[in-house]
Amino acid sequence: MDNIEKLDICNIIEVQKIRKILIKHPDLLSIFEILIIMSNNRINQEKHILKMEIEENIEPDLSSDDEDEIFE
């Protein structure tokens, strides 16, 4: 997994500058906004995955002795 860049004010300012540039191009601005949403969703999913606990795999005790008694 790639390192996620921490959010800081510089990132927010960069995004705002890009929005100002793209305001004259509504189609590009729309795509940019979709990319921002998708990126945020991906970051949130990665955080959720990192927080998930690992499930313990418990195998049942299977004994062949019991099976022999059934068929006698």
Image (tube, rainbow, N blue to C red):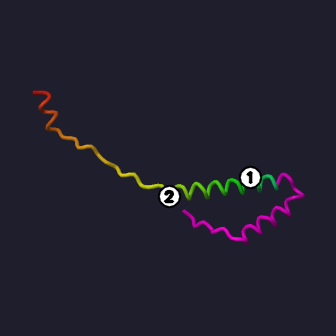
Q: Which residue lies at the image location 57% right of the left edge and 65% below the top edge?
A: 2
> Is residue 11 part of the magenta span, yes or no?
yes
Horizontal placement of 70 versus 43: left or right?
A: left
Instruction: Name the chief secondary structure element in magenta.
Output: helix
Q: Position of residue 14 (x, y in %)?
A: 77, 68
* x 60%, y 66%: residue: 4
Q: Nearer the viewer, mark 2 or mark 1?
A: 2
Q: Which residue is mark 1?
A: 34
Residue on which disc 2 sits:
51
Element type at marker 1? Answer: helix
Which quadrant, please, contains the C terminus?
A: top left
Report the side of 66 relative to 11 (left or right).
left
Which residue appears farthest toward the left when viewing the image? Answer: 72
Foreground: 54 or 30?
54
Amino acid beneath label 2: Lys
Q: Provide the residue span drawn in magenta.
A: 1-28
Residue 62 on the magenta segment: no
- On screen, residue 49 versus residue 6, left or right, reads left
Q: Earlier in the sequence, mark 2 or mark 1?
A: 1
Vertical arrangement, residue 54 with respect to residue 64, above or below: below
**Dot 1 crowding, Cα within 10 Å, few <14, some 14–19, many 20+:** few
Residue visible at 63% across and 69% down in the picture: 6
User: Residue 27 location, x and y as percent?
Assistant: 84, 51
Graded by Cα atoms within 10 Å as few (under 14), some (14 to 19) or many (20 or more), the crowding at tag 2 reads few
Residue 62 location in percent, x, y? 22, 41
CA separation, marks 2 and 1?
A: 26 Å
Q: Residue at x 77, y 56 (%)?
A: 32
For residue 15, which numbered disc appears in the image?
A: none
Q: Quadrant of residue 12?
A: bottom right
Q: Amino acid at mark 1?
A: Ile
